Image: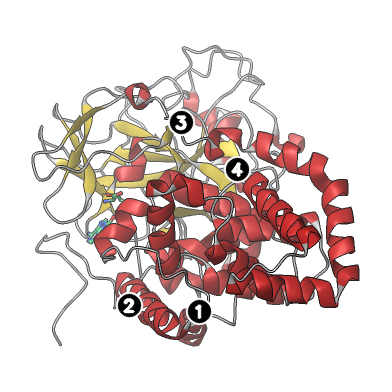
Amino acid sequence: MTKVNNKFKKKNDNSNQFTTIKTTNTNNKNNKNNNNNSNSYQNNCNSRRSNRAITNINNNNLNNLNNSTIINSTISTIPVSEYNLKSYFTPRIVYLWIKNLESITYLTQELNERLNSDFISLEWVRFREYLKNNPDQIKDSNFEVNLIKKYYFLNYEYSIELIQAISAIMFRSPIYVKGIWDSLDKKNNKNNNDDSTAMTNINDILDSNSKILQDVYEKITQIEKKFMEFDLQYEELWNSKFIANVGAIPYSIFNDIDGERLPILEFTFENLIHWDVGSPDEDYNYGCTCKDNCKDVTNCSCVQHGEVDYPFNKNGKLIRSDIGAIYECNSFCGCNFTCPNRIIQNSNNCNKNLQIFKTKNKGWGVRTLKPIKEGSFVMEHLGEIINHQTSEIRSVCYDKLNIMTYFDLDYGYNKKSKDKVLCLDSNYWCNISRFLNHSCDANLVTIPFFVEHKDNRFQRIAFFAQRDIPKYSEITVDYKIHDDDFVCLCGTKYCSYNKIE
Ligand SMILES: C[S@@+](CC[C@H](N)C(=O)[O-])C[C@H]1O[C@@H](n2cnc3c(N)ncnc32)[C@H](O)[C@@H]1O
């Protein structure tokens, strides 16, 4: 295959990378550091920085633990290490978090910042562990009451958003939050001599300003219905009994390294579009008018929509990767499915010869159980299509956990229009490509492609073999991370990171 320096896009080094995106939050210590880095959010793929972030969380929370008066002393201390964090914040749990965060997107910046600083705290990891073993404590815990108290003092409007925000902090269903408000109400009405310090404090606050209390309950009654709707919306996520059908993962999974099991994920066969993204522009829904089933494929107007000649040989193998994007024929065209310009759509997008396996030092990876010929289509990269704003919200979480599952759909965009670029997030909704690791000598090449529409925003991503790949080899892509701090473990002799000067 023709080798190229810049595979995906003519003038943009940063195109099509797995990346984490810098959050614009300014209150968080870690994010402050990020903001000083560079203007390019692309550079945020930085595992050392993220490790630092985890260290900061540890320190912050140790401080909190020492100084805080709000922590219930009965909470058992479980050892919390980076490993605990990873096993605790599974993609599914993280998805639940980000959904909550998204629901509070339009809250005030200040509240968002406060949520951010409480977010992913080790206190909460400990607390949730405690609740797991002591479910009777769930509804009436000083810890939670005190956390609410903390927010109560902020004088925010008592709105559905605030309740949702609190529930996000509480890491579980809003209905439980209501339970806590109810218990506050009961205590307050009893007006008894409850000597639980936290409760007494709360009662004092409430008594001294019963109008606030009244307002809160009026609003809570008003929004009770919304609570229910919200709960229903995410029922599947809140319900701890719901277990995703792991058997539905259409690939074999192999781990001879340790006992780790594949996290629960939602495998999808097409991209999901986030509600805030819209849909492809119908003006871009058009096809060719070829009369001969695109026999003279180089003259097909779909092919010509790309900027280079038809890039496949007669066996349907990609022969050059120095192309902008592939534009395939579609249902608007005059041709049928046997037309030569339908290579990707006619390929098997769920190749059972691929296996998810545990690598020695890069977590899970993908390997092939059969040889793959140079130029073969290997898989599409799938996930949830999100916009810049949503990616920033999610980054609040992803940055802290060193999650690197963003892939910018930036073919055809220049740096100035970055905020218009959509991104594929494959952390939870994904296919096997979610497990592709980075290599400085990658055997896959990434090519954007279009089938049903030609709207740049909704470009799709294909991976092709850029050389023959022997069976049992790990298949890898080049993340194209331009960051000296990335600790690359690809182990190839071409590794361009971690060079000792
Ligand atoms: C898209 S995921 C790939 C799947 C991942 N290995 C897993 O177990 O979920 C990207 C993450 O894989 C790891 N990774 C991938 N390639 C790597 C490399 N060459 N060196 C170090 N870590 C790598 C990093 O932790 C990165 O955040």
User: Is disc 4's CB within 8 Å of ligand 1?
Assistant: no
Q: Earlier in the sequence, mark 2 or mark 1?
A: 1
The residue where tag 3 is placed is 241
- Measured as percent of width and height from the top left, residue 403 is found at 39, 59
Above or below, comparing residue 159 to residue 309 in the picture: below
Category of crowding for the residue at label 4, using alpha-carbon neighbours closer than 10 angstroms: few (below 14), some (14–19), many (at least 20):
many
Category of crowding for the residue at label 1, using alpha-carbon neighbours closer than 10 angstroms: few (below 14), some (14–19), many (at least 20):
some
Alpha carbon distance from label 3 to label 1: 35 Å
- The residue lying toward the viewer, choosing from 313 and 429, is 429
- Measured as percent of width and height from the top left, residue 64 is found at 44, 81
Q: Could you tell me if the residues under marks 3 and 2 are in contact, i.e. CB atoms within 8 Å?
A: no
Alpha carbon distance from label 2 to label 4: 37 Å
Q: Secondary structure at mark 2?
A: helix
Q: Earlier in the sequence, mark 3 or mark 2?
A: 2
Q: Amino acid at mark 1?
A: Asn
| Residue displayed at 28% across by 58% down | 84
The residue where tag 1 is placed is 31
The label number, if any, that marks residue 458 in the structure image? 4
Quadrant of residue 113 within the rendered picture: bottom right
